[in-house]
Image: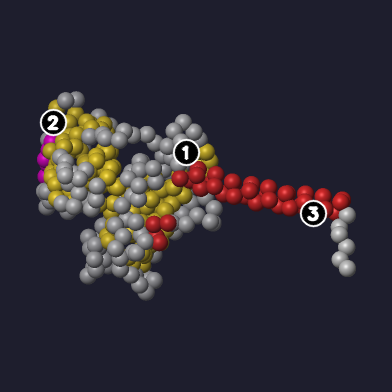
Amino acid sequence: MTSEPDPDERRTRTAGRVTALLAAVALVFAAGWALGSIGGAAPGSAGRLAPGPALRNAVDTADPETAPMGLVSTRAGYTLHPVRTVLPWNQPTEVAFTLTGSDGVPVRAIDGGATAVDVAVIRRDDAGYEPLRATAGPDGVWRAPVTFPGAGVWRLYAGFTPTGGPALDLGADLFVPGPFGPFTFTTEQRTATSGPFQVRVDGELAPGGSSPVFATVSRDGRPVTDLEPVAGTGGAYGRLVAVRQGDLARIPLRAQVTGAAPAGRSGPGIGFVAELPSTGSYRLFLTFTQGGAERTAEFTVDAAAGS
């Protein structure tokens, strides 16, 4: 016959179960808090980002051959490999990565030469976009200097065309630990200031079709007419990219004028053609050059059905 445990033993077992349950709840709560901090704090709040091994890049679970550009790290047999995924906040550092083929060997034959990869970073709250100037080393590693202005999870883009292959734009996540505070920007913003320049974008974004978009650059109320070709654009007087809010798909807008000589000058307007895949809100990032200095202006524009 099995004997019943005495009252003291039953109390001991019950206390043990309660302690284990509370520990499990605390663990789940801590994990949820960490993921919530990474996803973004509420306005006015602050947290500390501490990336751990459990983090994974959710967008890389999408079909790599059909996902929009910039959402996956592998496509058509080519892969973007960051050398380091944890980088410091608010101090000069460098982004380093390799681009490998299906054989795992770094790709060295890229259309446009040793500076032809279109590299940029953006934080996952759709702000802080920064184009980077990357160069390839003899070891096949691409390196670009950068200073991250805020802590959080950042998306690294690398757009390139391997010789004889398709045009690609691969992406991977980088983690910047530190005190987290969200950037702020309005839902619809068509004017911006970049240094001493004022920039405006005009044109409706028509999802599923082509639509003209114009950027106009002025300074102290006067049109700027000495814009220079932007490096790496094939002689265009500006580079304009759209980043879809939410998933950070990156869509470059096609410049209407290309092939300008390095000594060419133009302005104040720069024309582009947008071909956006869907409705939604897009962040637009314009890069232009004047006086040998490259600058970036940021906008927010909605692409509505029926535009």
Q: Amino acid at mark 3?
A: Arg
- Kindly identify which residue carries mark 3: 13
Mark 1 nearby-residue class (10 Å; few <14, some 14–19, many ≥20): some
Within the magenta stretch, is there residue 195?
no
Residue 31 visible in the displayed image: yes
Give the farthest residue toward the front: 1
Name the mark on residue 41. Answer: 1
Position of residue 39 in the picture relative to residue 3 (left or right): left
Position of residue 15 in the picture relative to residue 83 (left or right): right
Residue 69 is drawn in which quadrant?
bottom left
User: What element does badge 1 sit on?
Assistant: loop
Mark 2 nearby-residue class (10 Å; few <14, some 14–19, many ≥20): some
Name the image quarter holding the C terminus.
top left
**Above-or-below relation of 230 to 46:** below
User: What element does badge 3 sit on?
Assistant: helix
Residue 169 is drawn in which quadrant?
bottom left
The reply to whether the C-beta atoms of the residues labelled 3 and 1 are less than 8 Å apart is: no
Tell me where the magenta segment starts and ends, as one range: 264-268
**Above-or-below relation of 235 to 203:** below
Give the farthest residue toward the bottom: 103
Distance between the alpha carbons at the discs numbered 1 and 2: 40 Å
Coloration of the structure image: secondary structure
Q: Position of residue 261 (x, y in %)?
A: 12, 49
Q: Mark 3 or mark 1: which is in front?
A: 3
Q: Amino acid at mark 2?
A: Pro
Distance between the alpha carbons at the discs numbered 3 and 1: 40 Å
Work out whether mark 1 precedes mark 2 in sequence or the reverse, and give the earlier one: 1
Name the foreground residue: 294 vs 268: 268
